Image: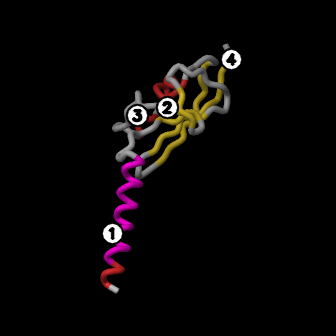
Amino acid sequence: MENILIEVAYGDNKKQKIYRLTLPSGSTARQAVLNSPLSADFPEADLYAPLGIFGKSVPDTTPLQTGDRVELYRPLKADPKEARRLKAAQKRNLLQSNKKAA
């Protein structure tokens, strides 16, 4: 059976790692994560979190090809829309308080 060369990427606020692996042809994205040493470096990582290949979300069962980089995603701390709304509101409040002070 032929092998493929792939990468598994993961990071947190403090460090990022890319693991290079040789796996049997036909291996899936989830198998790559589970066969990587990721859990030793990031024991808090959820190995069953959503996956992507080069930034595009993929199902666990996606077959890999040589050169693929599988990414294990962390959960978002805040909803992006809500974060933008709060930031805009803070900016408005700052502008209004600056106008009153002037």
* Residue positioned 34% across, 86% down in the render: 102
| Disc 2 packing (10 Å; few <14; some 14–19; many ≥20) | many
Quadrant position of residue 67: top right
Farthest bottom residue in view: 102
Farthest top residue in view: 1
x, y percentage for residue 33? Answer: 49, 29
Above or below for 89 versus 34: below
The residue at which mark 3 appears reads as 39
The Cα atoms of the two marked residues, 2 and 1, are separated by 38 Å
The Cα atoms of the two marked residues, 4 and 2, are separated by 24 Å
The Cα atoms of the two marked residues, 4 and 3, are separated by 26 Å
* Residue positioned 46% across, 33% down in the render: 37
Q: Earlier in the sequence, mark 3 or mark 1?
A: 3
From the image, give the main secondary structure of the stretch colored magenta.
helix
Above or below for 40 versus 23: below
Q: Which of marks 3 and 2 is nearer the N terminus?
A: 3
Residue 54, numbered circle: none
Quadrant position of residue 95: bottom left
Residue 2, numbered circle: 4
The Cα atoms of the two marked residues, 4 and 1, are separated by 61 Å
Q: Is residue 93 magenta?
A: yes
Range drawn in magenta: 80-97
Whether residue 98 sits left or right of residue 59 in the image: it is left
The residue at which mark 2 appears reads as 51
The Cα atoms of the two marked residues, 3 and 1, are separated by 44 Å
Whether residue 58 sits left or right of residue 39 in the image: it is right
Query: Element under label 4?
Result: loop
Q: What residue type is labelled 3?
A: Ser
Query: Element under label 2?
Result: strand
Q: What residue type is labelled 2?
A: Leu
| Disc 1 packing (10 Å; few <14; some 14–19; many ≥20) | few
